Amino acid sequence: MTVTPSTDLLRIALPNKGSLSAAASDMLREAGYRQRTDARELTLLDADNGVEFFYLRPRDIALYVGEGTLDVGITGRDLLLDSGSKAEEAMSLGFGSSKFRFAARPGVLGSLTDLAGKRIATSYVGVVRAYLEEHGIEAEVVRLDGAVETSVRLGVADVIADVVETGSTLKQAGLEIAGDVILESEAVLISSGRSVDADAFEVFKRRLDGVLVARSYLMMDYDIPADRVEEAVALTPGLESPTVSPLHREGWVAVRSMVPSAGAQQLMDDLYGIGARAILLTDIHACRL
């Protein structure tokens, strides 16, 4: 794919397919950016927001960004590290979490040292070789593009290294997870670290950060007797400080505060227990901190 450089637009690489694609586009829509409506589109210009999107194979994104052909991108941490690219991780994005593990037939791997001399099949050769080198283990790494769990049954490998979610696929293949987690991955924002317009990148990053906060917090409003407000504020301190306003009803105040989504229902119960009433929770669609 040929990319024509532009000094006026922030050039952003996005996954064109796979598990990260839809989640990345959803996040960008929440951040106020246009996204493609046709999966066959390879580029999309959002001139109003000063960006241009390029939809690429997930494995290629780190390479384009690392070379400076594109300014920033969204990909998996595993793909970034496996690529050997010079691109740098700028922030984690809170979706696409996965763990990278070794697996083998029962009894094959009792400890990490048992990997020595084994044939290890994987789609992530760079990650596995770096891990083996870090731990001083010599083993043969066999590159496979997919379905690595069948390689042991077919005699291609003794061990596999792959992304593991529930482990059910490995169990069906007669394998068991062994050893520590090789890598914990998730979707990340990456940057070339060289050619990026600092102001444009900061705006883009701030918007994504605003989406992460909006997804993690709710806005809580409630009324409470003024003599209990200190107790209430201790429960709902907010990010900076809650808003406390007097009500027409004498001796009562209204409180507004951002609260974590996790545990919000219990927090409502606790507030009710100290006298709060008219307790409301509303979603936050966007924010800037």
Image (cartoon, rainbow, N blue to C red):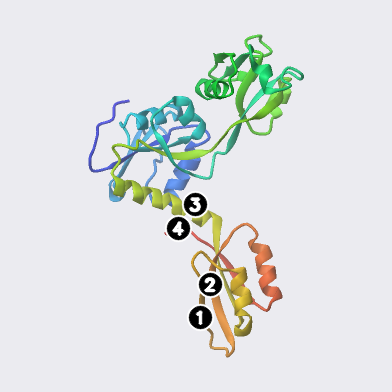
**Residue at which label 4 appears:** 286
Residue 236: quadrant of the picture: bottom right
Quadrant of the snapshot with the C terminus: bottom left
Which residue is the extreme one toward the bottom? Answer: 250
Name the amino acid, label 1.
Ser
Residue located 28% across and 37% down the image: 195
N-term mark: 4 or 2: 2
Secondary structure of residue under mark 3: helix
Q: Are marks 2 and 1 in contact (CB under 8 Å)?
A: yes
Which of the two residues, 96 or 285, is positioned nearer the viewer here? 96
N-term mark: 1 or 3: 3
**Residue at which label 1 appears:** 245
Residue located 59% across and 35% down the image: 98
Label 1 environment density (alpha carbons within 10 Å; few <14, some 14–19, many ≥20): few
Which residue is the extreme one toward the top? Answer: 155
Name the amino acid, label 4.
Ala
Name the amino acid, label 2.
Arg
Q: CA distance from mark 1 to mark 4?
A: 24 Å
Residue 38 coordinates in the image, percent (x, y): 40, 37
Q: CA distance from mark 1 to mark 3?
A: 28 Å
N-term mark: 1 or 4: 1
Which residue is the extreme one toward the front? Answer: 136
Q: Which mark is residue 147?
A: none
Residue 183: quadrant of the picture: top right
Residue 2: quadrant of the picture: top left
Q: Is residue 96 left or right of residue 75?
A: right
**Residue at which label 3 appears:** 212
